[in-house]
Amino acid sequence: MVMNTTVSTMSTSTTTQTGLTNTTTTMSIGITNTTSATTTEPPYFYQAIQFNVSMDGIYTIECNSDIDTSGFIYNNSFDPVYSILNLLANDDDSGGDNQFLFSIFLQAQTRYILVVTTYNEYDTGPFLIIATGLASIIFSQINVSSKHSMYFKELL
């Protein structure tokens, strides 16, 4: 089952201190995108966020939320049907408190997709992405649609 019924809003702020840039983005996981292996499986909600950086380097991307989140970073594109395709990294709990945390080398002028999903079925709610690195990360929300579905748990 894949549902594309609502689009959540997004707000972003950027601060720079001591050579590092901190970008925070607030979004929400809701019924915008839903995945499950079959119509009898419970749904898992996700939000896909496109981002890029202006300078090569190691960046930290972490999530802060009251819901248990998992994160996936893709190079160039994300297709929920072929979720392994273009997958660079995935994480579940490295950030503590059931949150994901990446420390990853990113290249300038490259399109990346961050997929934020829930560990538990039916979970929805707001989340905050905190990204720190040599330059700001430019986030923009995207809507991923597909005729098919996938089950994120297969990746964890």
Image (cartoon, grey):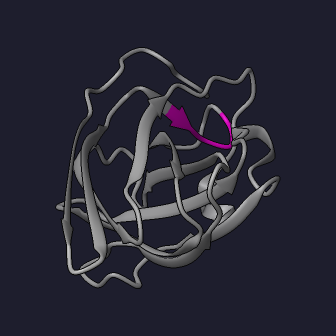
Residue 42's x, y, as percent? Answer: 50, 43
Is residue 110 found left or right of 16 in the rendered image? Answer: right
Q: Quadrant of the C terminus?
A: bottom right
Could you say which is closer to the camera, residue 116 or residue 104?
104
Residue under the point 58% across and 43% down = 41
Residue under the point 43% across and 32% down = 141
Could you say which is closer to the camera, residue 76 or residue 39?
76
Is residue 73 found left or right of 118 in the rendered image? Answer: right
Residue 52 position (above or below residue 72)? above
Could you say which is closer to the camera, residue 52 or residue 134?
134
Asked if the magenta segment contains residue 68, the reply would be no
When asked about the image quadrant of residue 126, the answer is: top left
Is residue 32 found left or right of 52 in the rendered image? Answer: left
Residue 27 visible, this orientation: yes
Q: Tell how many labels.
A: 0
Residue furthest to the front: 19
Residue under the point 74% across and 20% down = 147
Q: Quadrant of the N terminus?
A: top right
When asked about the image quadrant of residue 68, the answer is: bottom left
Residue 29's x, y, as percent? Answer: 33, 40
When asked about the image quadrant of residue 38, the answer is: top right
Residue 43 visible, this orientation: no
Asked if the magenta segment contains residue 35, the reply would be yes
Q: Which region shows up in magenta?
A: 34-38
Magenta-colored segment: predominant secondary structure:
loop
Residue 114 position (above or below residue 107)? above
